[in-house]
Amino acid sequence: MGQRLDEEKLDQLRTWGTGLAASSNQELRATGKAILLLIEEIEALHVELWNERARATSEPIPDERGDGSEEELGESLRTRLTRFTHRLPRAPG
């Protein structure tokens, strides 16, 4: 094992699955359809994994030093807004 399914390998499997699905032999046709269904599931899992990773990186990391008070949250928000506004391009003029 150890080798991952990259896009090239998935394309090759898709080609095989499509060819088998067009076969006149019922067993080969079923095999081709199964390959195509598995590829769809793999791609759906890739999208789900990508979305989960994106969601995980966008969630704020709680500050373990603080107690979560409103004052502390306000300061945290103010700090983040300040950093954000300093990254914005300045208007000419």
Image: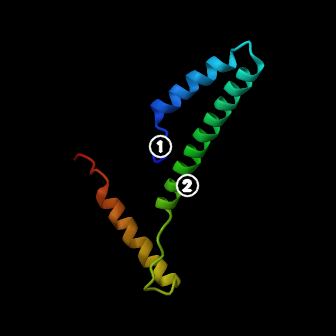
Q: Quadrant of residue 36?
A: top right
Q: Residue visible at 30% across and 57% down?
A: 87
C-alpha span from label 1 to label 2: 20 Å
Badge 1, how many Cα within 10 Å: few under 14, some, many 20+? few
Q: Residue visible at 56% across and 21% down?
A: 15
Q: Which residue is mark 2?
A: 52
Residue 84 position in % (x across, y down): 36, 61
Badge 2 marks a residue whose secondary structure is: helix
Q: Quadrant of residue 42?
A: top right
Badge 2, how many Cα within 10 Å: few under 14, some, many 20+? few
Q: Residue visible at 65% across and 36% down?
A: 38
Nearer-N-terminus badge (1/2): 1
Q: Residue visible at 45% across and 85% down?
A: 66
Q: What mark, if any, has residue 85 been given in the picture?
A: none
- Is 75 placed above or below 1 here? below
Q: Which residue is mark 1?
A: 4
Q: Are marks 1 and 2 in contact (CB under 8 Å)?
A: no
Q: How many marks?
A: 2
Near-viewer residue (40 or 75):
40
Amino acid at pointer 1 = Arg
Residue 19 position in % (x across, y down): 62, 17
Badge 1 marks a residue whose secondary structure is: loop
Front label number (1 vs 2): 1
Residue 68 position in % (x across, y down): 52, 83
Q: Is residue 26 left or right of residue 83?
A: right
Q: Is residue 21 left or right of residue 86?
A: right
Amino acid at pointer 2 = Glu
Which residue extends farthest right? 26
